[in-house]
Image: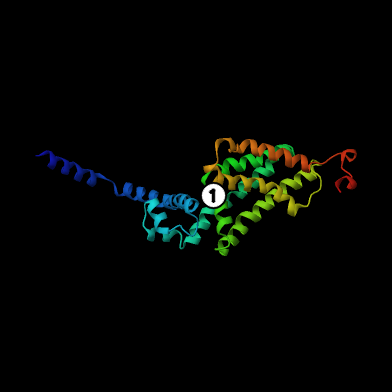
């Protein structure tokens, strides 16, 4: 028997000895992994190219499947994008609300924790590019903008209002106009995201922003601007004019 015939024989035996059950299990595992692989590929391409320029064929190729397979899980590019947002941001609000409920520290510590946690879980990751994408392309795709408003912006506002109301109820923050106060918390993080995806790649080393130092400074400014003051220390209306 030649070396070639022995190799063929070994291969035949390997195929023959492979259990149908084992093959089925491997296929099922691969099938279960496909949605996650497609979402990972879609996130990378959406962030790199934007919504308009992303092609589903490219997402499928990146995930190692056909376009037809992609459409089995996500019937359109819009639905694929929505799934990416839910997987990386929107679907995490129940977890974040639970953390807020269980937090035992003061308002300063809570504010610092929330902003740092957001940076670690979203800002430092590829998912941070989703916000820039929506801001850039919302006018072209109102359905995407409406979805993001409902699934991300509204829940985030509700979460931030809970944080502020908790501080007011504990006497640590002064009464605030909640509808606008939440933007004071959001604006620094939007700036940080915009800087990361627009200016950071091309700015000189002397102008690089340290995200942690930036967040610490914002927390200090925000808390001291919102904290409750003793009556004797509170500014009078005349001093504000």
Give the camera-side residue of 75 and 126.
126
Q: Quadrant of the N terminus?
A: top left
**Which SS class for mark 1?**
helix
Q: Which residue: 67% across, 48% down?
A: 187
Give the residue displayed 53% in from the left and 48% down from the top.
127
Colour approach in the figure: rainbow
Q: Position of residue 36 (x, y in %)?
A: 45, 50
Q: Is residue 56 visible?
A: yes
**Tally of numbered discs:** 1
Is 131 positioned to the left or the right of 161 in the image?
Answer: left
From the top left corner, tell me how far across and down residue 3 is, in percent: 12, 38
**Would you say residue 104 is visible in this rendering?**
no
How would you rate the neighbour count of disc 1 (Cα within 10 Å): few for under 14, some for 14-19, many for 20 or more?
many
**Disc 1 target residue:** 129
Depth check: give the residue in front, 175 or 180: 180
Q: Position of residue 16 (x, y in %)?
A: 22, 47
Residue found at the very far left of the displayed protein: 1
Left or right: residue 206 versus residue 42 is right
The residue lying toward the viewer, choosing from 139 and 67, is: 139
In the rendered image of this protein, does residue 51 appear above or below residue 22?
A: below
């Amino acid at each position: 028997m030649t070396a070639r015939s022995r190799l063929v024989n070994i291969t035949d035996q390997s195929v023959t000895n492979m259990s149908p059950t084992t093959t089925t299990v491997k296929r099922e595992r691969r099938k279960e992994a496909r949605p996650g692989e497609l979402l990972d590929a879609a996130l990378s391409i959406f962030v790199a190219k934007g919504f308009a320029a992303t092609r589903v064929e490219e997402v499928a190729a990146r995930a190692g499947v056909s376009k037809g397979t992609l459409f089995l899980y996500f019937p359109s590019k819009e639905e694929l994008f929505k799934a990416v947002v839910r997987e990386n941001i929107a679907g995490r609000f129940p977890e974040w609300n639970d953390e807020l409920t269980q937090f035992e520290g003061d308002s300063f510590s809570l504010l610092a924790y929330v902003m740092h946690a957001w940076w670690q879980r979203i800002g430092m990751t590829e998912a941070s590019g989703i916000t820039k994408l929506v801001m850039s392309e919302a006018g072209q795709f109102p359905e995407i903008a409406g979805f993001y408003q409902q699934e991300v912006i509204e829940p985030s506002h509700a979460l931030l209002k809970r944080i502020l109301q908790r501080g007011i109820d504990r006497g640590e923050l002064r009464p605030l106009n909640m509808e606008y106060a939440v933007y004071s918390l959001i604006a620094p993080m939007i700036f940080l995201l915009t800087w990361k995806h627009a200016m950071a790649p091309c700015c000189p080393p002397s102008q690089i922003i340290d995200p942690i130092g930036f967040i610490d400074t914002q927390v200090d400014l925000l808390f001291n601007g919102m904290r409750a003051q003793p009556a004797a220390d509170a500014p009078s209306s005349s001093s504000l004019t």
